[in-house]
Amino acid sequence: MVAHEVIVVGAGAAGLMAALEAALGGARVLVIEKTPRAGTKILASGGTRCNLTTTLEPRLAARLFGKQGERFLRGPFQALSPQALRQSFSEWGVPTMTAPLEKVFPVSGRARDVRDALLRVTTAAGAEVRYDTPLQNLAAPEDGGSTWTLQCADGEVLESKAVILASGGKSYPRTGTTGDGYGWLQGLGLPLTQPRPSLVPLRSSAKWVQDLAGVSLQDCELLLQGADGQQIVRRRRPMLFTHRGLSGPGPMDLSGRISAMGENPQVDLRADLLPDIDRESLRDELLSLAAQPGRPSTAKLLKGKLPKRLVGPVFAACQLPIDLPAAALSRAQRHALVEALKRLPLPVGGTLGYDQAEVTAGGLSLSALDSRTMQTHDHPNLFVCGELLDLDGPIGGLNFQAAFSTGFLAGRAAALSIAGK
């Protein structure tokens, strides 16, 4: 008899949730974690506050993962919904509160409380967690057998009836997520979508962008277009200028699409700086300003609408002097100014890479496993969950929710499989 019926690789959000469910299902569970502690990314997330889920309903939350992701996550998000997850944490002593942009945080504001509660209930359910235990090799059962073999870096060999891979992607590698799982999946002949950084700030070498470091827009709509001018994705979220480019929820939500374009992408990124004001209203305001006595400058239009430091770059973008009287604007100049406000080009040369990324896009192809159980089609009793999957959603607790929900199903299914149900 193997000592552990289920071995979970990785003690992050997905792994601990999977271990909890497997243990609650009656399985003997071991979690092996390569680093000295559990839930390092939980501890680092949300500025150490941990945006653990979303206020969105399951279907709306799934929709934000794109068409493929939406189809795959409908079941997991119904099985463990954001509301159910909040209820569970409340029962575990971590009440939650809502925040802007559909975010949910622990009331305490401490990510450690989220990690500690999850670890506490997991071990209380009977799962063993072993730290400083990197997995080196994973071997499937041979000759019709049913035992998986796991070789650890220190030479120890472990055996189990089921394996749950929850080792994470490649984002924030300093937390221990260095993409080890991709090699194990490839070694088993499973299909991978090329991993890439996502939810990461964008890089820009444009001096005017860097000079605006510290300027933020709380309401901005970003449009990412292809070379043919067709819309790829649009997001209305806050944006922050930095000394290296663009950050904040808006730019970071687009980063996965941009990183998919390669190392030196030809990016056509536009910003609607005033999404609540349509073009016709802006033209009417300009004409009204032109009719005022005293020949007010055109820049007066933007007073109170945009940060002062951003006004100059807007006028530079449409090649207009900032002190030009509104009455002196030609029709073509009015059009150019309105377009600069509604479609300001943002020069971007890629992302800041895995070191700054919150999640990894790409990973195990969703077609390789059953979304009801997280079990791979080709390898019975091999379950994969969390960031190893080809899933990435926007900022707002959605990726943690995906980790918790897929881990929940993997753990439950592993226990049922061991029990022969």
Image (tube, rainbow, N blue to C red):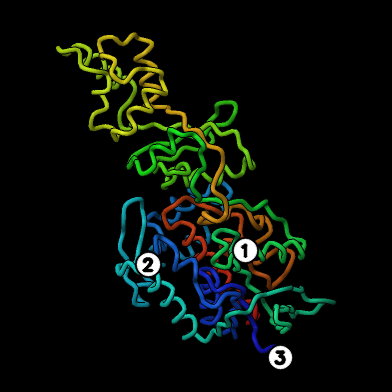
Lower position in the chain sequence, tag 3 or tag 1: 3
Residue 381, horizontal then vertical, whole percent? 68, 73
Q: Furthest residue to the left?
A: 293
- 3D distance between C-alphas at marks 2 and 3: 38 Å
* Looking at the image, residue 386 lies above or below residue 333: below
Residue 31, horizontal then vertical, whole percent? 58, 79
**Quadrant the C terminus occupies:** bottom right
* Circle 3 residues within 10 Å: few <14, some 14–19, many ≥20: few
Residue 421 seen from this side: no
Callout 2 amino acid: Arg
Lower position in the chain sequence, tag 2 or tag 3: 3
* Nearest the eye: 366 or 248: 248
Residue at the image position 29 percent from the left and 35 percent from the top:
307
Q: Secondary structure at mark 1?
A: loop
Asked whether the beta carbons under mark 2 and mark 1 sit within 8 Å of each other, the answer is: no
Q: Nearer the viewer, mark 2 or mark 1?
A: 1
Q: Secondary structure at mark 2?
A: helix
* Nearest the eye: 158 or 78: 158
**Residue position for label 3:** 1
* Quarter of the image where one finds residue 6: bottom right
**Residue position for label 2:** 86
Left or right relative to 417: residue 19: left
* Circle 1 residues within 10 Å: few <14, some 14–19, many ≥20: some
Q: Secondary structure at mark 3?
A: loop
Q: Which mark is residue 149?
A: none
Q: Which mark is residue 178?
A: 1
- 3D distance between C-alphas at marks 2 and 1: 29 Å
Q: How many labels, in total?
A: 3
* Looking at the image, residue 354 lies above or below residue 158: above
Residue at the image position 41 percent from the left and 20 percent from the top:
318
Callout 1 amino acid: Thr
Q: Nearer the viewer, mark 3 or mark 1?
A: 1
